[in-house]
Image: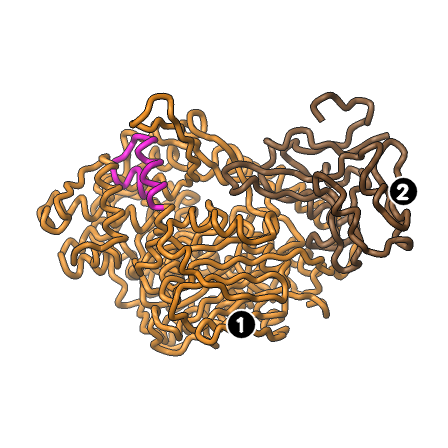
Chain colours: A brown, B orange
Amino acid sequence: MKRLKVIDQDRCVGCELCMFACQRRFGEGGFGKSTIFVHSRGGMSRGFTVVVCRACEDPPCALVCPTDALQVRKGGGVILQSHKCIGCGNCRDACTIGAVFWDEEANKPAICIHCGYCAKYCPHGVIALVEKKKLDVKT
Amino acid sequence: MLKHDPLQKVLYIDLTGRRSWSEYRPELFEKYIGGAGVASALLQEHCPQGADPLGPDNPIIFAVGPLVGLFPMASKTVAMFKSPHTGNFGESHAGGRSAVSIRLAGYGAIVIKGASQTPLYITIFNDKVQFYDGRGIWGMKSNLAARALREREPGSGMRTIMRIGLAGERLVSYACLITETYRHFGRMGLGTVFGSKKLKAMIIGGKQSLPVADKKNYKKIYDEIFHQILTDSSLKKYHDLGTALNLVPLNKLRALPTKNLQDAYFEGVERISGENLAENYLGRRIACTHCPIACIHLAALREPYLDEPYFYKTTFMSYDYELVYALGTMLGLDNPKGLFHLMDEIEVLGLDAITTGVVLAWITESFNKGLITKRETIDLQPKWGEYQTYREMVRNIVLQPNEFYQIVAKGVEHTSEIYGGKDFALAFGRNEMPGYHTGYGSYLTFLTGARHSHLDSGGYGLDRKILGKEGLGPNFYAEELLKEECHRQILCSLVICLFARGVYTHEVISQALETAGFNLKVDELMKIGREILKQKYVFKMREGFSFERLSIPKRILETPSPFGVLKEGFLKEAVLLYKKLLLGGQNEI
């Protein structure tokens, strides 16, 4: 099972190409539905934080969902069953690292499916799709 | 244009009445695409003839283009206004997060009119525009004001924070507008216009989705452009060393203006070269939104406080070729740390670094020649390479404690009209020169370019291309530069970073535009480019610009260029030929 991993966020230059790539999966521009997010650590001179789902094996977001719309994915992380979601936002509040994003247009969460599309567009080696078992202590 | 593309929405902000509204203007974007094209049409609409650049009538226009948020390196915002520095057409570009933020907040352009009585700042998050009391951040250095706003307002990562420093507040005519700490609407005094309106800062943010005409084709064209950008060798060098890589080659050519262009070769260049700065000081590289190149190079300067042992601070400063030229070689300064200190002072006070450097260089030469004395400088003795004195002077330019500093706060052309020294006052169309003593091409760009910027038609690039070729007359230059300037109107209307001009050929542009719902063939693009340039000149002529009255500082004719000593007659002839080609022999457009 593969998952998207932030290899080294200190290599991030803040270009946000990953955010645009994520949105482009749907054949759209912008980043309204993006499930990866980059922001500065309080001004660009301090570098950037890359926020994306860590594929928790026991994900808090799924635990707090009142309609079981978030199905735990084999190998960690969740899959949204959109028809069940009522847009309450509990999942967003439950994620400690803020990796449950919000699709304002659909009023539903936007959560990484670990497809690795974004990693193909990161020219600076910040993120990669890796085998889950290869994860080391630093994650 | 696609039916639901938010690009066609123009946001109007009236600072006098503190109100805002938006209008759908699809016709503007269909005709002029965006960026420079749309902004110049809006400037024509909103700036009354003879408007006082510092009065409420002077509009500030920001415009982006259809490819922003869709394709990489469509990352610039074009600002237009009447320049308080030149008293005529003002245009300035910046990247950072500005373009994507405006586009994803749901706008193609923003028009700011009126003026506030008291300091304020504005936030624009999607449809919500809010006016806030700015007195709490008025008088603050640009970086500190930004820090306060960054912590107070939401949207980190998908917003731009535009702000001015003290220079803008105190109406130095060449104050810049800073965005994301390290990018600038540097030239022509946009910061001054902000200051005149008591507008300290503006935050714009949003994260909308953007439609495309053909999803599959969009992804295909994106991949082609992305691949091209990553494999383009000219772009790799901007990633590696940044624009400062140009110092050594320009010095070898003897085209690097030094000590107010008394020379075109700088002995100390190795110490402040792109290579040396990268090896010894580079602390981080960062990028504008949607740009894989990351040309922004930040130096990390670790220094002790002198009042206590083992007490250090580390400051980050962005350096670019133009800054190293204006504050380094022009001032005979080859000490990197001194250079960074000077850059930092100019950054936090919010001045145009190119103009400031040229002003300081003029002051030094005038002081050496006795045109000005310690009476004018308030006991400061400028000397090539002595950055502490220059730092003091920069503060004085902003604070303007006497008449002399009030005058130099308006640029070298104005100053030399009062104190003399016009022959070595290095400005063109009242805009201080960028760092290219490469030949006729460069100076013709400064003279004929609509905003008197090296980027208007890139004549310095033309010079380097044709070096060694003989017998090219004024006509050749006029034709080439006009063609290039028309072409660049298209790039700047799409707000594509000029570094990517080799990737975005007209064919690629035409394909990319198709995915955004624009059907423009290559020949139509050229026609639009020319029309946009003409429109800029309509404004310039209306405000009193005249090709015939352009003055040429003698200094550029004295110091030999890579093409030898330049001839005034050649330049003047080429300027008139350019005029003829642009206007077709008419005096009026």
**Residue count near mark 2 (Cα–Cα under 10 Å), binned few <14, some 14–19, many ≥20:** some
Q: Amino acid at mark 2?
A: Gln
Q: Is residue B516 left or right of residue B502?
A: right
Residue B462 drawn above or below residue A13: below
The number of numbered discs placed on residues in the rendered structure image is 2
* SS majority, magenta: helix
Do pointers 2 and 1 mark residues of a single chain?
Answer: no
* Quarter occupied by the N terminus of chain A: top right
Judge whether residue A114 can be spotted in this image.
yes
In front here: B511 or B570? B511
Q: Toward which corner of the image does residue B247 lie, by quadrant?
A: top left
The answer to if B345 sits in the magenta stretch is yes
In the image, which residues are magenta?
Answer: B326-346
Find residue A48 and report its horizontal and vertical position in percent. Answer: 59, 38
In what element is the residue under mark 2?
strand
Quadrant location of the C terminus of chain A in the rendered image:
top right
Q: Which numbered disc covers residue A71?
A: 2
- Near-viewer residue (B132 or B80): B132
- Measure how far apart labels 2 and 1 are at the Cα level: 46 Å
Pair 2/1: label in front: 2
- In the image, is residue B473 above or below residue A98? below
Residue at figure coordinates x 40%, y 75% from the top left? B57
Question: Is B467 positioned to the left or the right of B154 in the image?
Answer: left
Q: Position of residue B114 (x, y in %)?
A: 43, 73
| Disc 1 target residue | B12
Residue at coordinates 51% horizontally, 66% vertically from top-left? B131
Q: Position of residue A81 (x, y in %)?
A: 89, 49
B447 versus B115 height, above or below: above
Question: Which mark identifies residue B189?
Answer: none
Q: Which chain contains the residue that carries disc 2?
A: A
Name the element at disc 1: strand
